Amino acid sequence: MTREPLFPGKDYVHQLKIITELIGSPDGASLEFLRSENARKYVKELPKFPRQNFSARFPSMNPTAIDLLEKMLVFDPEKRITVEEALCHPYLSALHDLNDEPVCSNHFSFDFEDPSSTEEEIKELVWLESVKFNPHQTI
């Protein structure tokens, strides 16, 4: 869209600050999807920013591209445009091909990222995963 990074942060903390400066600080309800209480607390402690006008921030950008960007840059994933909706967006119409865009029927589960896992449990999971790729080698 701009042929350069929209959020050129020095690290993930700086990048999150730059993103919230554009899309505005999330309200409490928009943080419910975060499973980590520490993550929610961290985001709540960031400086508060109002949502910027995307057209003013990107004056030379195609208005249709701005519309898609506004729909994709939403903090709460439940309120964000889906991949299927984004692919059907007018901005991507020239690239859109229903026959070449399979959609996964199942949602991904990230339960394996359970923060209550111990270090030993994580080591065991990594070992079991590595064995899948080298089943004939034993340690």
Image (cartoon, rainbow, N blue to C red):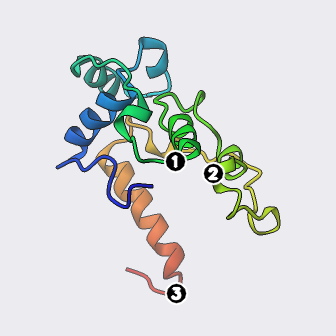
**Residue at which label 3 appears:** 136
The answer to the question of whether label 3 and label 2 lie on touching residues, with beta carbons closer than 8 A, is: no
Label 3 or label 2, whichever comes before in sequence order: 2
The amino acid type, in three-letter code, at marker 2 is: Tyr
Q: Which-is-in-front pick, marks 2 and 1?
A: 1
From mark 3 to mark 2, how far is it between C-alphas?
Answer: 49 Å
x, y percentage for residue 3?
37, 61
| Residue 62: mark | 1
Q: Is residue 5 above or below residue 20?
A: below
Q: Residues within 10 Å of mark 2 (few under 14, many from 20)?
A: some
The amino acid type, in three-letter code, at marker 3 is: His
Question: Is the N terminus in the top left, top right, bottom left or bottom right quadrant?
Answer: bottom left
x, y percentage for residue 88?
73, 50
From mark 3 to mark 1, how far is it between C-alphas?
Answer: 55 Å
- Taking 65 as reference, is 35 left or right? left
Label 3 or label 1, whichever comes before in sequence order: 1
Q: Residues within 10 Å of mark 1 (few under 14, many from 20)?
A: few
Q: Which-is-in-front pick, marks 3 and 2?
A: 2
The answer to the question of whether label 2 and label 1 lie on touching residues, with beta carbons closer than 8 A, is: yes
User: Which one is nearer the viewer's eye here, 106 or 138?
Assistant: 106
